[in-house]
Image (cartoon, helix red, strand yellow):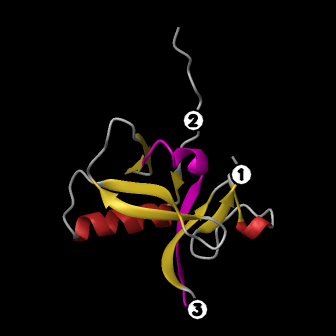
Amino acid sequence: MLQEIDVQTIELTSAASKAVTDILNERNLKGYGLRVFVAGGGCSGVNFGMALDNNVRDVDMTFESDGVRIIVDEVSIDYLQGAKIDFINDPERGAGFLVNSPNASVHGQGEESCACGGSCSCNN
């Protein structure tokens, strides 16, 4: 018997969605989505990364948020379930994407975001 698993999707804010859509349109990348992943090497052990991708593998999960396809691999989904991705343009810190994941704590302080460039310890 198949068991249905409830997986929370990843959400893009309207600012993040617009930023991704603008990049895709500027580069004429039809059929591409935003791949979101985790990789080692951050100051707390894990970094969030993003890339434009049109190669969806059988083990990937895909979601749609505000018109943008999001692609996540089978390992990264554990760290990214329920995450919200925003795009900020701060005069002091510059422009970029910010990942707010309920599965992450900034440097063990119990906050639910990765504010130092994407590095976090993940609670899973």
User: Residue 63: percent from the left, percent from the top?
Assistant: 44, 43
Q: Answer few, some or many: residues within 10 Å of disc 3's Cα (few below 14, many 20 plus, some between 14 and 19).
A: few
- Please tell me whether residue 106 belongs to the stretch shown in magenta: no
Q: Marks 3 and 2, Cα distance to the nearest angstrom?
A: 36 Å
Q: Residue 7, which numbered label?
A: 2
Q: Is residue 54 above or below residue 19?
A: above
Residue 56: quadrant of the picture: top left
| Location of residue 41 (image quadrant) | bottom right
Three-letter code for the amino acid on which mark 1 is drawn: Asn
Is 90 included in the stretch rendered in magenta? yes
Mark 3 lies on residue: 92
Instruction: Between label 3 and label 2, give the one nearer the viewer.
Output: 2
Closer to viewer: mark 1 or mark 2: 1
Above or below 97: residue 34: above
Q: Is residue 54 above or below residue 112?
A: above
Pick the residue in front: 40 or 33. Answer: 40
